[in-house]
Amino acid sequence: MLVKPEVVDYTTRRVPPQLQRAIVRGSSREVRGETHQVTLGETIDLDEPEGEDILVTGSDRVRDVDGQEYERGTDYEIDRHAATITPTESGDLEDGVEYLVDYDYRIAGSFESDEFGGSPSEESVRDITGLTTRRACSQAAKLLVDRGSEARTEADVSFPPTLPADLSLVEALDLEDVPSDAMAIYQLTEGPEGLEARFGDEERVRDTVEQLRRRAEALSRRV
């Protein structure tokens, strides 16, 4: 027989949707010796990155066929998000000359709901380095949006100081308008006046990210 603990006090609330668009960045890839011809005044689009992919900070290297290297910020500027290189007017890169470019980039995928309004507060960027394809990144982004774009019920519940050691709080929860079979414990705080528990009816986005990371790591260990 399930023992129902005494509930000292509780409050419930609806938490509005918080996530309508997600970008998930996966593993990094190396590119070495990609050839580009410089036209002064024009931006160079790097070949491999696409979509939401992003260049790894500090991984870029521009050199000529003789091995002469050029300096970022002096000879060229780089845009990590757009995956572009722009020769500077005062730099040493010469018009019409071919150069070799090395860089690393992170693959990425994204998903947005029909309700996305463009606000940064509705968007989240997450790193799950164990994902090795853009498709996997996009699927993970969709899962995050699915989990984060629905309104949730949360409950803050106060229990007395003495509770049975083997009691399952989730199973024992019996509050009006709060379905216990869909609840999970988010936070527990024990104090002299009793136990404070926060329950929620949906996995939080950060919990989902951690689950995806663990799955990706487990898969990578099998390969």
Image (spheres, rainbow, N blue to C red):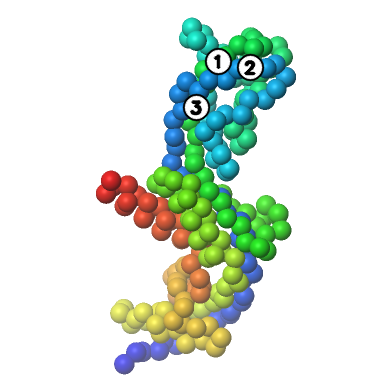
Find residue 33 and report its horizontal and vertical position in percent. 47, 20
Q: Nearer the viewer, residue 84 or 80?
A: 84
Q: Which residue is the site of mark 1?
A: 99
At 42% from the left edge and 56% from the top edge, which residue is drawn?
A: 212
- From the viewer's perspective, is residue 57 above or below residue 214? above
Q: Are marks 3 and 2 in contact (CB under 8 Å)?
A: no
Separation of marks 2 and 1 at Cα, in angstroms? 7 Å
- Residue at 47% from the left image edge and 50% from the top image edge: 135
Looking at this rendering, what residue extends furthest in the bottom direction?
A: 1
Q: Which mark is residue 103?
A: 3
Position of residue 164 measured from the top left corner of the image (x, y, whole percent): 33, 82
Are the two marked residues, 2 and 1, in contact with CB atoms closer than 8 angstroms?
A: yes
Figure quadrant of residue 151: bottom right
Q: Which residue has dot 2 on it?
A: 38
Say above or below: 16 vs 159: above
Q: Residue at x 31, y 52 (%)?
A: 218
Q: How crowded is mark 2: few (under 14 residues within 10 Å), some or many (20 or more)?
A: some
Name the spot of residue 160 as percent of width and height, x first. Answer: 44, 82
